[in-house]
Image (cartoon, grey):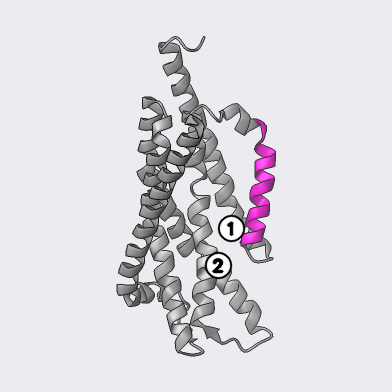
Amino acid sequence: MDQEQNLVEHLAELRKRLIITLVAFVVFLVLSFAFVENIFEFLKQGMPQGTKMVVLGPSEVLRVYMIVAGVTAIGMTIPVLLYQAWKFVAPGLTETEKKVTASFIPIISLVFFAGIAFGYYAIFPTIYEFFVNLGNTQFEMMQTAGNYFSFMANIVVPFGFIFELPIVVLFLTRLGILTPQFLTKNRKYAYFLLVVIGVILSPPEPVSDIITTLPMILLYEIGVTLSRIAYKKRMKQLKASGLAD
């Protein structure tokens, strides 16, 4: 009976956190839509000079604005989502774990936006130019606004999550789930996985593959370094408390 009651309470708490996150997303979506033309003008600056976009009808204008506002709202909702996730799991954590997890919320949010910026300024222009040049050799390309911003979102947003790799590694090491020894031992498998991800995200062209893959490998190595630092610190704390030899 107690287990059933606890399950109901956990589900009710989860429902509460999801509702708060959803409400925050809707609020941010409305705010983003109110300033969507300004955001649209900012994003257009990344287009090559002389490129003209067309829309295929009034419905595509709404689609473009929803893509722009939606991606913006998702980015703004990330800190709220992280905080609500922390509030949900906090009762089951020790005081030390609560402090560790809470301290990572602003860091994860900032790194996510840094990944978005990197994807937008460094990766997207290269990939976009490649496909435009490829298309112009055989076709007369007409760029619709909907296709442009959908393509941009599909390239840029994943880098927000990819940039979280070192922070996630550091976070898991602080909690004692990961160790630098494990990361070092499985480095070759991690490299292989990152290369596969890089090839999937980039055009089928060696230079683009390298431009996409190298930052991810660098992020992994940064994660390994941070893991070593966090592991040493954790071991010192455990020894000081008498929990480790």
The percent position of residue 109, horizontal first and vertical second, equals 39, 49
Q: Residue at x 37, y 40 (%)?
A: 87
Q: Residue at x 44, y 65 (%)?
A: 71
Compared to 22, does 95 lie above or below?
above
Q: Looking at this view, is 151 or 222 the one in front? A: 151
Q: Residue at x 54, y 35 (%)?
A: 224
Magenta stretch: dominant SS? helix
Instruction: Say left or right for 135 vs 59.
Output: right
**Mark 1 and mark 2: span between their CA atoms?**
9 Å
Between discs 1 and 2, the one toward the N terminus: 2
Residue behind mark 2: 126
The local crowd at label 2, few if under 14, some if 14 to 19, many if 20 or more residues have their Cα within 10 Å, is some
Asked if the magenta segment contains residue 169, the reply would be no
Residue behind mark 1: 211
Compared to 245, does 100 lie above or below?
below
In this picture, which residue range is highlighted in magenta?
A: 185-201
Badge number at residue 31: none
Q: Give amino acid for label 1.
A: Ile
Q: Looking at this view, is 115 or 213 the one in front? A: 115
Label 2 SS: helix
Compared to 54, does 192 lie above or below?
above
Asked if the magenta segment contains residue 194, the reply would be yes
The percent position of residue 113, horizontal first and vertical second, equals 41, 55
Instruction: Say left or right for 210 vs 224.
Output: right
Q: Looking at this view, is 189 or 131 the one in front? A: 189
Q: Residue at x 56, y 30 (%)?
A: 178
Dot 1 and dot 2 residues touching (CB under 8 Å): yes
